[in-house]
Image (tube, coloured by chain):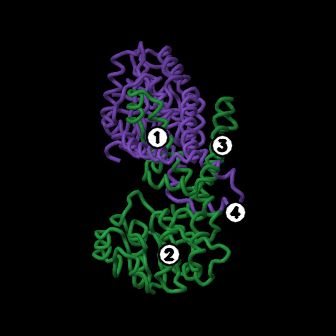
Chain colours: A green, B purple
Amino acid sequence: MKIGIVGLGLIGASLAGDLRQLGHMVVGTSRQVATCKLAISRGLVDEAGTELDILAEMEAIIICTPIAHIVPTVTQLASLIKPGTLVTDAGSVKGSIVAAATQIWPHFVGGHPMAGKAESGIEAAELGMFQGQPYVITPIKGTVKSSIEQLANLVNALGARLYYATPEEHDQAVAWISHLPVMISGSLISACVANNDPLGLRLAQNLASSGFKDTSRVGGGNPELGLMMAKYNRAEVLRVLAGYQQDLAETVRAIELEDWAGLQLKLEQNQATRTNFLPPTI
Amino acid sequence: MKIGIVGLGLIGASLAGDLRQLGHMVVGTSRQVATCKLAISRGLVDEAGTELDILAEMEAIIICTPIAHIVPTVTQLASLIKPGTLVTDAGSVKGSIVAAATQIWPHFVGGHPMAGKAESGIEAAELGMFQGQPYVITPIKGTVKSSIEQLANLVNALGARLYYATPEEHDQAVAWISHLPVMISGSLISACVANNDPLGLRLAQNLASSGFKDTSRVGGGNPELGLMMAKYNRAEVLRVLAGYQQDLAETVRAIELEDWAGLQLKLEQNQATRTNFLPPTI
C-alpha cells in the first residue's frame, strides 16, 4: 500500500518507520527540508518532500501535524488526492476535528495513536512505539465503513490496542486521563514556587524526591501540548477540572473535620481502584 | 559503636543493614518474633528481640516505628538506657515529635531519612538505600550539640545528603513536596472514578497510559502513610492544600477566559522551574 505521512515529528516519523517495516511504500512531508533529509537517511520513508503534491497517488494518508493544522491540511489534500483515499489524523482531540474533516473528505476517519515520550521531533522517533499502546478510532455517522476497516487493519498491523469511540467519548476520556493530569500536575509546581519564600523553596527543592518527581512530570512537560489540550478540548477540560476541584475539596474537608475514617476509606479506595487504570504489563 | 534500631520495617531494617556494614554493632527490636529472626538470618543485625531492654547498653538508638509510637518509645527508653545515649527517630513529621521527645530525653535529635519505595516491611529492605538521598536533622533550642554531631556523622557515613532544618521548616517543606502530592494525586483517581458512568470509566481505564500512571502513583500508595501525613502534619497540609487550590483555580480561570497567553506563560514557567526540584542525577 502507498501511505503518505504529513508531518514528520515524533508520531509521524515513528508511524512512517513502522509502516515501512511492514512493507508499505511510505512518502512523508515536512515543512523542513532538513527533516525530510533525515527521514530518508534514517530509512523511515521511501521519499520525502516539503509539498503535499507528492502525496497525490497515495492510498492512505495520516496527518500528524499539530492540531490546528489538521483540518486545513484535509482541505488542501482534497483537491490533490484520488477519490476514495483514506485520510486519517493523529490529533489528541477529536470533537473539533472529525466532523469538519469528514464534511470536507468523506473518507476521513479520526484516529489517535496514544503513544509518546518526553522528547519530541523526528530525532526521538522509534520503531515499535505503538506496540501494545492504545489507538483510538473515532468514526461518526457518515464515516465510510470501508475506510474504517482500512484504518483498523493498519492499527492492528502496528500491534496497537484498538479502541472505537465517538469523538465525544474520546475527548471526555482523554480529558480525565491525559489533560487533567497535566493541569493538576502543573499546579503542584507553580503553587509550591509561588507560596514559599526563597529559603523554604530551596529546602523543598532539596528534599523533593520520587513522589514529587512523578507527580510533577507531565505538568513540567511541553507547554505547547498543555496549551493545545486546553484550547481544543476546552469544554471537557473545564468539566473535569470542576469535578476534580470538588473531589479535592472533599479531601480538604475530611482533614479539616479530622474525619480520619473517611479519609482512610478514600485513600484505600484510591489504592484499590488505581490498578484498573494500569495495563497488565505495567 | 553499639547502635539500637527500634522497628525493623523498610527504613529500620535498611538502616540496620547499612550501619552493620559500616562496622557498627547493631541490635534491633520488633514486636514480631518472625521479623527478629529474619533480621538476624539476613545479616541485617547482630542481635534482635521483642523487648526494648536489650537496648540498655546502646550508644545510639534510632526509632523507626510508625509516628504514633515514637514519643511513647522515647519515654520507655528513658528509664532503660545510659545517660548521654543519642536517641533519634525516622518519622516523616517532626513538629509534633521533637519538642516532646527532647523534653523527655535531652539527647534526642529529630531525624528524617527521606528514602523509600513502593514496597514496605523488612522484606523490602536493601543496602545503600540512603545513598545520595536527603536526610534531614531537626535540632531545636536545647538539643545537645554533641548529639547532633554524633547523628550527623552517622548520616554522612550512610552517604546521604545531610540537611539541617527546624521541625517547622521541615514540616512545611515535606507538606509541599511529599504530602501535597499524595492528596492531589489521590483525587485524580477518585474524581475520575466518581464522575464517569461505567462505559466512560472503562474507556478512560483503557486509554490511561504513562501520564496518568505517574501522576496517580503516590495517590494510589499505602493508605496508612497518607493518613499519617494528614493526621500528624494537619496544619501544614491544610495550608499547602489551600495554596494549591488557589493556584489550580487560576488555571481554571485562564481556560474559562481563554487567556491562552497567560496559560502558556504558566506552563512554560512550570517546565522551567521543575528542573530545580530534581537532583542532578535524575
Q: The disc numbered 2 marks a residue on which chain?
A: A
In three-dimensional space, the C-alpha distance between marks 4 and 3, rounded to whole angstroms, equals 21 Å
The percent position of residue A90, horizontal first and vertical second, equals 50, 68
Q: Amino acid at mark 2?
A: Gly
Q: Amino acid at mark 3?
A: Asp
Give neighbour class at mark 1: few <14, some 14-19, many 20+ (Cα, 10 Å). Answer: many
Chain assignment, label 3: A
Q: Which residue is mark 2?
A: A159
Question: Could you say which disc has been placed on residue B199 in the image?
Answer: 4
**Image height of B267 relative to B1, above or below:** below
Q: Is residue B83 above or below residue B37?
A: above
Q: Are marks 1 and 3 on the same chain?
A: yes
Residue shown at 63% from the left, 58% from the top: A172
Instruction: Pick whichever of labels 1 and 3 is earlier in the sequence.
Output: 1
Give the SS element for disc 1. helix
Name the side, left or right, on which B132 lies relative to B239. Answer: left
> Are labels 2 and 4 on one chain?
no
In three-dimensional space, the C-alpha distance between marks 2 and 3, rounded to whole angstroms, equals: 37 Å
Q: Which residue is mark 1?
A: A189
Looking at numbered disc 1 in the image, what kind of residue is underneath it?
Ile
Check the image and name the residue furthest to the right. Answer: B197
* Same chain for the residues under marks 1 and 2 in the image: yes
Residue at the spot of label 3: A247
Dots 4 and 1: beta carbons under 8 Å?
no
Pointer 4 chain: B
